[in-house]
């Protein structure tokens, strides 16, 4: 026991020494992430890292917190080190080191993860990459594929996609024996960092849970959904027609994360749901075959998997976007379905259009009184539009 304790303490000390030796390097990467927010000490004082696997409902959560609390929190959305490298251009720093660094320099740090049931998460992740990876074709063309063809490909890769859990596997914190299915969340403070675990099945309660933890009102707004994409029709049919191969049922039954996050009753209900949707066993790719499949897909990839317009709210804190954010927040509080997005360029153009309409009304009145001053209209619009653009076209900030 003593030897085991010494082993654990030794590696904690080593991790701390490694961290301190990398401080300047971590700071450089951190500065790239937060950009101009570093100067806003009030917002940069409180940071929320939504650090989750893909396709667990994190985009909805990020947009909801941004709409509700961008005036109080810096919100960073990240899935893995590949994504961190994409945004910062370096692969020498981990996400956990960035989180630890912000706590180290005195910031109030929250880290949020979400659990989603295994089959649904696999489906969603597969369809997220169906165009750039799995079929290397446009969504328009894939939408015409037969569901049978898509199901066969999905079953081939089923055991290898959407694996792991960030809260348990990535955070490096002490994990309780089980998820609190009564409170519907876990909240642990470790090394002055606040770790929160939610479940997608409880998304209707996220607003209340986070409002209490973050001490500010959070309204949950539905965001990026595969059903609303070009591929949405095929995805809906796939979910309706899919039957789980009987040999995969045992994989789900033994899933350690399902057993941790769900109560016995919830597990039984979930397994019974899929027990009524079983099909003949199938043969998946072997591990070497799957690795070959992945490498081949990456080599042949011609479609960009960068997702534009990914969020309702991209996090820009200029005056125009902040005003739009308040408007959407008030609509969401009243239960109005939100279909609009906060896009900085569109917000600026909208403000310019509104200003020009006002100017046109004034000019029309003036021209009615004095028709000899036709040049006034052009001059006023040009000068006003340029001034507005200069004031509003500030840089959007925050990781997308």
Image: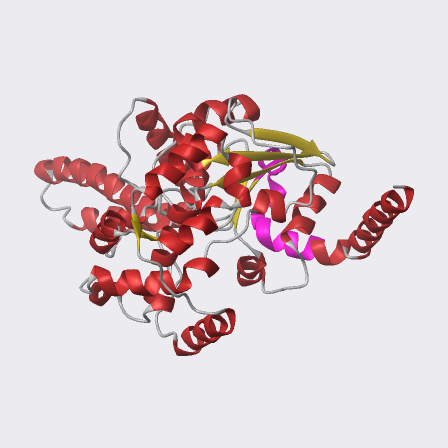
Residue 370 sits above or below residue 213 on the image: below
In this rendering, does residue 74 appear at all? no
Residue range highlighted in magenta: 27-48
Q: Main secondary structure of the magenta part?
A: helix
In this view, the residue in front, 68 or 375, is: 68
Q: How many marks?
A: 0
| Magenta segment includes 208 | no
In this view, the residue in front, 390 or 155, is: 155
Q: Residue at x 59, y 42 (%)?
A: 167
Q: Is residue 286 left or right of residue 204?
A: right
| Colouring scheme applied when the structure was drawn | secondary structure
Residue 25 sits above or below residue 110 on the image: below
In this view, the residue in front, 68 or 262, is: 262
Position of the N terminus by quadrant? top right
Q: Position of residue 17 (x, y in %)?
A: 84, 52
| Magenta segment includes 29 | yes
In this rendering, does residue 357 appear at all? yes
Q: Quadrant of residue 303?
A: bottom left
Residue 57 sits above or below residue 78 on the image: above
Q: Position of residue 246 (x, y in %)?
A: 36, 53
Q: Residue at x 57, y 47 (%)?
A: 166
Q: Residue at x 68, y 31 (%)?
A: 189
Q: Position of residue 334 (x, y in %)?
A: 30, 22
Q: Position of residue 153 (x, y in %)?
A: 33, 65
């Amino acid at each position: 026991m003593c030897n085991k304790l010494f082993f654990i303490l030794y590696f904690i000390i080593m991790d701390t020494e490694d961290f301190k030796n990398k401080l300047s390097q971590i700071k450089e990467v951190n500065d790239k992430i937060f950009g101009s927010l570093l100067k806003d000490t009030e917002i940069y004082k409180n940071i929320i890292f939504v650090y989750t696997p893909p396709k667990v409902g994190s985009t909805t959560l990020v947009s909801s917190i941004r709409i509700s609390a961008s005036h109080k929190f810096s919100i960073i959305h990240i899935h893995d080190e590949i994504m961190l490298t994409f945004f910062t251009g370096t692969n020498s720093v981990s996400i956990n080191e960035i989180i630890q660094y912000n706590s180290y320099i005195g910031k109030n740090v929250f880290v949020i993860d979400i659990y989603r049931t295994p089959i649904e998460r696999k489906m969603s992740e597969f369809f997220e990459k169906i165009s750039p990876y799995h079929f290397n074709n446009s969504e328009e063309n894939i939408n015409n594929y037969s569901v049978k063809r898509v199901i066969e490909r999905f079953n081939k890769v089923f055991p290898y996609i959407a694996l792991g859990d960030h809260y348990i596997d990535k955070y490096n914190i002490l994990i309780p024996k089980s998820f609190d299915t009564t409170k519907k969340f876990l909240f642990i403070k470790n090394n002055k960092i606040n770790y929160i675990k939610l479940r997608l099945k409880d998304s209707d309660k996220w607003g209340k849970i986070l409002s209490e933890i973050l001490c500010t009102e959070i309204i949950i707004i539905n965001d990026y959904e595969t059903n609303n994409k070009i591929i949405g029709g095929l995805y809906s049919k796939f979910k309706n027609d899919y039957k789980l191969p009987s040999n995969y049922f045992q994989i789900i039954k033994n899933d350690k994360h399902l057993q941790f996050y769900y109560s016995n009753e919830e597990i039984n209900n979930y397994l019974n749901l899929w027990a009524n949707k079983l099909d003949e066993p199938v043969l998946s790719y072997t591990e070497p075959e799957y690795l070959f499949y992945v490498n081949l897909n990456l080599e042949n990839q011609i479609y960009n998997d960068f997702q534009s317009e990914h969020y309702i709210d991209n996090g820009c804190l200029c005056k125009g976007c902040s005003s739009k954010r308040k408007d959407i927040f008030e609509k969401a509080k009243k239960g109005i379905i939100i279909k609009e997005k906060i896009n900085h360029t569109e917000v600026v153009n909208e403000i310019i259009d509104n200003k020009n309409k006002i100017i046109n009304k004034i000019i029309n009145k003036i021209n009615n009184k004095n028709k000899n001053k036709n040049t006034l209209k052009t001059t006023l619009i040009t000068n006003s539009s340029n001034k507005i653009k200069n004031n509003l076209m500030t840089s959007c900030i925050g990781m997308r």
